[in-house]
Image: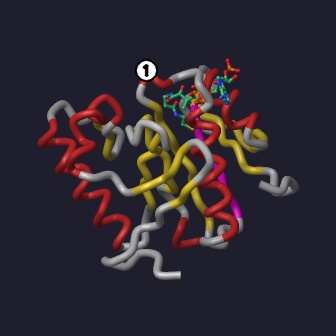
């Protein structure tokens, strides 16, 4: 596999959504969910600067950040990816949806593709996620995807890990 090379970014096709690299033309629609180091972009320019860092992080082998695309409309509905742990053969899975697409199953579909790719193409030994105790939708999503709670962290954060007994 050519992961982390200049001329390759993993594109994953599913029945309802696909995962692809974010392009400049997407950024205007994505400001609401454009974050880097927990700081939110306020302008397209800032989102572009963040995306440049995200692209470099991919080339450095540190993270993979996908746009989740509705296969019918070709619009990006949210993002997901692996943001930490790749140097140890693990992946912290993170995700965010544009609010207008909440409650339609898009993230469940996108995360299933990312998990399948992480396990079967990237060979990750462990997939985990962290969220806050109060984040009911994220906890529901993770449990639906067969993650189990593994730790209470500081600052109300909780850690979940994928139980690898299912066939995805
Ligand atoms: C966490 C987050 C992605 C969850 O969004 P979500 O809309 O609940 O997740 P999904 O897109 O998978 O949608 C699932 C819901 O759609 C419903 N649904 C509707 N149509 C569906 C379909 N065709 N297929 C599957 N589910 C469908 C499901 O029943 C489910 O509803 P429920 O939670 O009331 O049971 C969203 O709240 C978010 O972006 N939060 C901010 C960022 C964040 O907290 N990230 C988590 C970091 S770990």
Image: 44 above or below 99 = below
Q: Quadrant of residue 164?
A: bottom right
Answer left or right for 87 relative to 33: right
Q: Residue at 42% across / 55% down in the picture?
A: 20
Q: Is residue 154 magenta?
A: no
Q: Residue at 52% across / 23% down in the picture?
A: 102
Q: The C terminus is located in which quarter?
A: bottom right
The quarter of the image that holds ligand 1 is: top right
Question: Looking at this view, is 1 or 59 the one in front?
Answer: 1
Q: Which residue is mark 1?
A: 100
Question: Looking at this view, is 68 or 138 the one in front?
Answer: 68
User: Would you say the magenta stretch is mainly helix, strand or loop?
Assistant: strand
Question: Looking at this view, is 24 or 158 the one in front?
Answer: 24
Mark 1 Cα-neighbour bin, 10 Å: few <14, some 14–19, many ≥20: few
Kindly state the secondary structure of the residue where label 1 is placed: helix
User: Could you say where residue 70 lies in the image, as x and y percent from the top left?
Assistant: 48, 39
Q: Is mark 1 within 8 Å of ligand 1?
A: no
Answer left or right for 10 relative to 115: left
Q: Quadrant of residue 63?
A: bottom left
Looking at the rendered structure, the number of numbered marks drawn on it comes to 1
Q: Quadrant of residue 149?
A: top right
Give the residues drawn in magenta, as a range: 126-131
User: Could you say where residue 51 lies in the image, as x and y percent from the top left?
Assistant: 26, 52
User: Could you say where residue 120 lies in the image, as x and y percent from the top left?
Assistant: 69, 69
User: Could you say where residue 131 lies in the image, as x and y percent from the top left?
Assistant: 58, 34
Image: 63 above or below 75 = below
Colouring convention used in this rendered image of the protein: secondary structure
Residue furthest right as drawn: 165
Answer left or right for 62 relative to 153: left
Q: Residue at 54% across / 44% down in the picture?
A: 17
Q: Residue at 48% across / 25% down in the picture?
A: 101
Image: 14 above or below 138 = below
């Amino acid at each position: 596999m050519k992961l982390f090379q200049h001329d390759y970014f993993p594109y994953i096709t599913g029945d309802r959504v696909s995962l692809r690299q974010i392009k400049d033309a997407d950024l205007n629609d994505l400001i609401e969910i454009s974050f880097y180091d927990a700081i939110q972009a306020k302008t397209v320019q800032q989102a572009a600067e963040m995306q440049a860092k995200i692209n470099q992080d991919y080339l450095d082998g540190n993270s993979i950040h996908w746009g989740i695309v509705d296969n019918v409309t070709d619009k990006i509905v949210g993002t997901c990816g692996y943001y930490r742990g790749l140097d140890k053969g693990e992946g912290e899975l993170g995700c965010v949806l544009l609010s207008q697409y909440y409650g339609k199953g898009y993230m469940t579909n996108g995360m299933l593709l990312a998990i399948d790719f992480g396990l079967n193409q990237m060979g990750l030994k462990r997939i985990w996620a962290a969220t806050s105790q109060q984040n009911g939708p994220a906890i529901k999503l993770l449990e639906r995807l067969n993650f189990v709670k593994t730790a209470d962290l500081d600052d109300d954060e909780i850690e979940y890990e994928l139980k690898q007994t299912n066939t995805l």
